[in-house]
Amino acid sequence: MPLASYQAIMAMGGFFALLGIVLIIWNKREKERYYDSILLRRRDIKESLTRDPDRPWLSAWQIGGRISIIVGIMLLIIGGVIWIIS
């Protein structure tokens, strides 16, 4: 395999790892915005402070970020191993 192939695999791995980090940070900001904005509009402050019931759709960015980081790390490892072997 030419050197460009390994670099492409490792570049995709780096992209997915960075994308995962960005998605996890985005999730944290969205949760803070949601719970801070809902605090002012709700009469029931206990629900906002204890975050009960939990909103599972707020964790979607975090789950996607974790999957993206795993895929990115796997691509980086695979690209590195193939590069070292050949």
Image: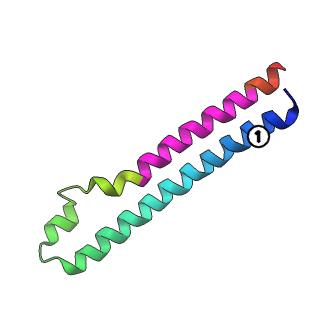
Residue 20 in the figure: left or right of residue 78 = left
Which quadrant of the structure image shows residue 44?
A: bottom left
**Residue visible at 21% across and 67% down in the picture:** 48
| Left or right of residue 84, residue 75 in this image | left
11 with respect to 55 (left or right)? right
Q: Position of residue 29 (x, y in %)?
A: 43, 65
Residue 72 position by quadrant: top right
Q: The magenta stretch spans which residues?
A: 61-80
Comparing 40 with 55, the one in front is 55
Q: Quadrant of the N terminus?
A: top right
**Which residue is label 1 attached to?**
8
Q: Judge whether residue 16 is colored magenta.
A: no
Which residue appears farthest toward the top when viewing the image?
Answer: 85
Residue 15 lies, in percent from the top left, at 66, 48
Residue type, label 1: Ala
Residue at left offset 87%, top offset 30%: 2
Magenta region's main secondary structure? helix
Q: Where, quadrant-wise, is the C terminus in this rendering? A: top right
Q: Residue furthest bottom?
A: 40
Most distant residue in the left direction: 44
